[in-house]
């Protein structure tokens, strides 16, 4: 459980970091908080020739309104209300002190909480060369729109409307069996706008088309939406849970986030 | 006032909390030790062709390599507790039989280089289909089974499956091996039993005195699993022998989960005969035990450890058991807290709960009607229950949990479940019980085995300083503290004045075949040996004081014994040193009818668990969990509660979270802590503990108690979930997905 040999680089500007990524291409990996990358190195599941440590890149550790620098630690995202609900489920207190927001987004684990939250809030990812909406950024398992020489610089987190987050994991801090989040706007008891997303049941965090706009913001609507969500997802079963259970659970969690947001 | 019995804070803890513990990986007892990485089989079952180590040997910093063929040439197969057609060596030769089995060792300047080079070893694999092979089949019958079943008003006939699970201590295995001339000195976090020292020495072709095995002072936990590190003592010992350098190896978590040891997986068919009034008339077990790729000593002990307690806490006189052992292409099994108890009690206590439902008798009342009530009690299979007051413990547990109120809530429609487990917790294993794996005729041809003993040495320096040397290899249980309490009482000093050394050195410590840390034996024989050594010294001190007069201080007595032996009473030996051994009573070898007192002491516990099941997600929430223990006299109540909580956590893991899983090709699916799901602190319910103290008739009156809740919690929680769902067929672990599927069925 020791990593294979690698070269270690420690750039101090975004430009230097991007230049290193351009130089080494697929051979390079960005090291931020290391909470996912270092175990993968120790398992020898990843064998990058070069690690580009961005922890010393000036300016990436700042929060400016809804714009959150890439190396801001996960625990420091608590000012975003939806993230504040999700953070207790993001690993453990100690890993959240080290793990970064940008790292979690760039890692794009389909069961991770922060990518789902960013997607549901309609946020975006600022890279070393462009800004991408969250729903364009996440492509598949651990795969994003980032080019090999492109670096996440910041993420942008809108406030959202009435928000809620729910997840079920076997243990506190585990990867979720399923998770759901929503951001809704209710006017006069009627849903005016709703973004509902789920994670861990597809190859990326996914927004569901539940056609809630115009429906009464009631427990009954939430229940129907949950049933629709359960029918809409098609998760593979895994060691811990059957496919049928995961689809059912996703429906339960969608119902619960909507019921809370409507309340 | 006695120090024993007080909730003294542990003398171990300050060093541990300050990061000053000395664990296996901290030790550097020999200079220039090189680091090993182990090449392991990626296949569950495969023929091994040529092993090419040339590229590994050419890699930077590599000292050398050892292959399975060389292990086979340099060592003999390990002895085990039963005959097996498949010999077990420290590494595979010709055929690998489980994923993770060692096939070669690469030794280099550091672990990084060793792992880099190990990747360069080329093995010519020829994968085979996984196999199962039955290697052991013994049947036992005590009493009049046919009559009991003929008289029954109800026969419960069910199958119960307990999956493999594990211990997962924070600290994994570690070995430093230094072969010099024709002997091996090895430092390892081995936990005993030291019968396995002989198994390792024999495999190496060494007389016992030429395998010097030394344990570190501190342990990052074991819970049984470190008994099996002896196979690596042999493997690394052979690497040191071949390469002529000391070799060290610290197991990583991937290695640990794949290839250290698991608890056995067991499927048990139970037939239980009941009278209409609830009396349990007869019990038949049919157990099939998966011990993995080899029978590794002390296996098949998991199947026999509970043999004297097949009747559990009940008076039933007619008991039969068929015990079969199957080899599979899985990691060999070994000690795991509870050792056979979780498997037995899951079957027995689920059977009692099912019977209660079918008889229309409340489970607590059914237990009460069957509990053993007179002591000592001889069980049909030969167990001797030393003492207890089982019904009083049951009453205490029911009152503590508010049993009637909970049943009233249920009757009022609340979707909760209440589960009960009443179990006997045996401690201090008879070293002879494993010979039940042989027939009476086979046993008669060999050396009879019995008993369980421990040694202890205490010395008092010329200035009156007291040093106690243990042979109980503590793995975090606080033996040093309790030893200091015992000695302080007997020598009239404060516990803080007593130095207690926990390292065991097989060349210098006062150990015997049963020494070590298993079967919750410390409070009985460990404490007995410490007390015996301290009593011997107290007698000698008193004799010197009497002889010299004037109420001499301990310091003055010690000074006299060392500096002025001429003044001692005539015939008394100089110095102040005592080595004592203490053997638990009533542990005869198995008799000609296969009866055995498999343990010396028997605690009792009643657990009551109250659960609520989330009908939408299948998640089980434990609303209350009560455990009432009677483990005899409590030597240190603070440590006792720590042990009870630890055993409980391990049992909750088995009930709700943990299992070792393989796919049909024998590939391990639970190879990391992402997939092998042990509960962590936030996942655990509150445990409410109460104690009764019915002393054991020997030693300090204390019984073992470190394993009871690991035995009881899986059954109590499963009974509660079954009660909540109104189902009989509940399987472990009761994960959300499984519970939800049970509700759909």
Image (cartoon, grey):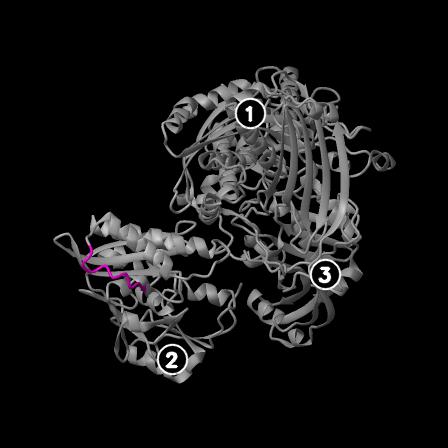
Is circle 3 on the same chain as circle 2? no
* Residue drawn at 52 percent across, 57 percent down: B672
Residue A106 showing in the rendered view? yes
- Badge 2 is on which residue? A148
- Badge 3 is on which residue? B92
Above/below status of B347 relative to B20? above
Query: Under tag 1, what secondary structure?
Result: helix
Q: Chain of mark 2?
A: A
Judge by depth and name the residue closer to the eye, A65 or B74: A65
Which portion, as a residue range, is magenta? Answer: A207-215
Judge by depth and name the residue closer to the eye, A98 or A87: A87
How far is the residue under mark 2 from the one under mark 1?
69 Å
Return the x and y of residue B289 as percentages of the image width and height.
68, 44
- Badge 1 is on which residue? B359
Q: Chain of mark 3?
A: B
How far is the residue under mark 3 from the one under mark 2?
44 Å
Return the x and y of residue B223 as percentages of the image width and height.
57, 42
């Amino acid at each position: 459980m020791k990593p294979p040999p690698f070269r270690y680089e420690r750039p101090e500007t975004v430009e230097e970091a991007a230049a290193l990524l351009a130089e080494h291409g697929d051979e390079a990996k960005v090291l931020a908080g290391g909470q996912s990358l270092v175990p993968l190195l120790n398992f020898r599941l990843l064998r990058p020739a070069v690690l580009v440590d961005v922890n010393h890149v000036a300016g990436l550790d700042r929060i400016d309104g809804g714009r959150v620098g890439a190396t801001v630690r996960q625990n420091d995202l608590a000012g975003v209300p939806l993230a504040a609900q999700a953070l207790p489920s993001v690993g453990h207190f100690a890993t959240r002190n080290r793990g970064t927001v940008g790292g979690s987004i760039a890692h794009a684990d389909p069961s991770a909480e922060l990518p789902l939250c960013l997607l549901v809030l309609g946020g975006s990812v600022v890279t070393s060369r462009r800004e991408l909406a969250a729903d364009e950024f996440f492509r598949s398992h651990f795969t994003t729109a980032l080019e090999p020489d492109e670096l996440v610089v910041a993420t942008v987190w809108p406030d959202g409307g009435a928000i809620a987050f729910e997840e079920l994991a076997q243990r506190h801090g585990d990867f979720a069996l399923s998770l759901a989040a929503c951001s809704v706007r209710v006017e006069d008891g009627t849903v005016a706008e709703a973004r509902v997303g789920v994670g861990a049941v597809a190859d990326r965090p996914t927004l569901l088309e539940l056609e809630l706009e115009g429906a009464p913001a009631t427990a009954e609507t939430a229940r129907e939406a949950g049933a629709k969500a359960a029918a809409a997802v098609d998760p593979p079963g895994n060691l811990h849970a059957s496919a049928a259970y995961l689809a059912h659970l996703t429906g339960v969690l969608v119902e619960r986030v909507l019921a809370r947001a409507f309340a | 006032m006695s120090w024993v019995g007080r909730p003294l804070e542990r003398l171990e803890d300050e060093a541990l909390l300050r990061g000053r513990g000395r664990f296996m990986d901290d030790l550097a007892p020999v200079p220039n030790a090189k680091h090993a990485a182990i090449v392991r089989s990626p296949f569950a079952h495969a023929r091994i062709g040529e092993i090419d180590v040339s590229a590994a040997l050419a890699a930077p910093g590599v000292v050398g390599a050892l292959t399975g063929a060389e292990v086979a040439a340099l060592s003999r197969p390990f002895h085990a507790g039963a005959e097996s057609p498949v010999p077990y060596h420290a590494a595979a030769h010709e055929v690998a039989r489980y994923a993770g089995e060692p096939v070669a060792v690469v030794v280099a300047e550091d672990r990084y280089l060793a792992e880099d080079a190990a990747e360069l070893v080329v093995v010519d694999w020829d994968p085979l289909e996984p196999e199962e092979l039955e290697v052991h089949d013994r049947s036992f019958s005590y009493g009049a089974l046919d009559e009991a079943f003929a008289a029954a008003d109800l026969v419960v006939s069910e199958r119960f499956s307990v999956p493999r699970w594990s211990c997962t201590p924070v600290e994994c295995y570690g070995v430093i091996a230094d072969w010099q001339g024709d002997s091996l000195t090895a430092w390892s976090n081995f936990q005993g039993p030291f019968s396995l020292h002989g198994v390792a020495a024999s495999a190496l072709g060494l007389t016992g005195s030429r395998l010097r095995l030394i344990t570190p002072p501190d342990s990052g936990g074991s819970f049984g699993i470190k008994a099996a590190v002896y196979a690596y003592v042999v493997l690394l010992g052979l690497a040191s022998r071949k390469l002529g350098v000391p070799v060290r190896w610290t197991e990583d978590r991937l290695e640990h989960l794949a290839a250290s040891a698991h608890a056995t997986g067991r499927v048990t068919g139970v037939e239980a005969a009941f009278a209409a009034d609830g009396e349990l008339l007869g019990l038949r077990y049919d157990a099939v035990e998966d011990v993995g790729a080899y029978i590794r000593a002390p296996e098949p002990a998991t199947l026999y450890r509970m043999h004297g307690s097949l009747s559990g806490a009940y008076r039933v006189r007619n008991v039969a058991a068929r015990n079969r052992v199957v080899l599979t292409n899985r990691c060999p099994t070994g000690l795991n807290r509870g050792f056979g108890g979780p498997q037995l009690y899951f079957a027995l206590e689920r059977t009692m709960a099912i019977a209660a439902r079918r008889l229309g008798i409340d489970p607590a009342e059914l237990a009460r009607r069957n509990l053993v009530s007179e002591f000592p009690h001889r069980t049909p299979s030969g167990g001797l229950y030393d003492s207890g007051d089982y019904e009083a413990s049951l009453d205490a547990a029911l009152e503590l949990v508010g049993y009637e109120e909970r049943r009233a809530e249920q009757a009022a429609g609340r979707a909760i479940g209440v589960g009960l487990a009443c179990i006997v917790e045996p401690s201090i294993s008879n070293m002879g019980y494993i010979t039940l794996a042989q027939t009476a005729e086979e046993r008669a041809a060999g050396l009879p085995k019995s008993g369980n003993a421990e040694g202890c040495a205490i010395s008092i320096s010329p200035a009156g300083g007291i040093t106690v040397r243990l042979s109980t290899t503590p793995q975090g249980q606080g033996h040093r503290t309790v030893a200091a309490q015992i000695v302080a009482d007997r020598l009239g000093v404060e516990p803080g004045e007593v130095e207690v050394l926990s390292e065991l050195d097989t060349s210098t410590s006062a150990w015997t075949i049963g020494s070590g840390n298993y079967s919750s034996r410390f409070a009985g024989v460990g404490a007995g040996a410490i007390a015996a050594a301290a009593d011997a010294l107290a007698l000698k001190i008193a004799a010197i004081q009497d002889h010299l007069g004037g109420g001499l201080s301990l310091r003055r007595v010690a000074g006299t014994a060392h500096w002025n032996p001429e003044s001692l009473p005539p015939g008394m030996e100089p110095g102040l040193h005592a080595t004592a051994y203490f053997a638990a009573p009533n542990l005869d070898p198995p008799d000609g009818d296969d009866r055995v007192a498999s343990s010396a002491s028997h605690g009792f516990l009643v657990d009551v668990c109250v659960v609520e099941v989330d009908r939408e997600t299948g998640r089980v929430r434990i609303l209350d969990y009560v455990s009432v223990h009677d483990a005899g006299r409590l030597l240190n109540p603070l440590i006792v509660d720590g042990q009870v909580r630890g055993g409980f956590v391990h049992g909750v893991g088995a009930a709700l979270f943990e299992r070792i899983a393989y796919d049909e090709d024998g590939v391990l699916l639970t190879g990391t802590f992402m997939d092998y799901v042990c509960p962590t602190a936030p996942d655990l319910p509150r445990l409410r503990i109460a104690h009764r103290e019915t002393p054991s008739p020997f030693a300090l009156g204390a019984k073992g108690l470190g394993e009871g809740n690991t035995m009881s919690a899986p059954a109590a929680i499963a009974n509660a979930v079954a009660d909540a769902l109104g189902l009989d067929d509940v399987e472990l672990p009761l994960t959300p997905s499984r519970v939800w599927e049970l509700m759909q069925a």
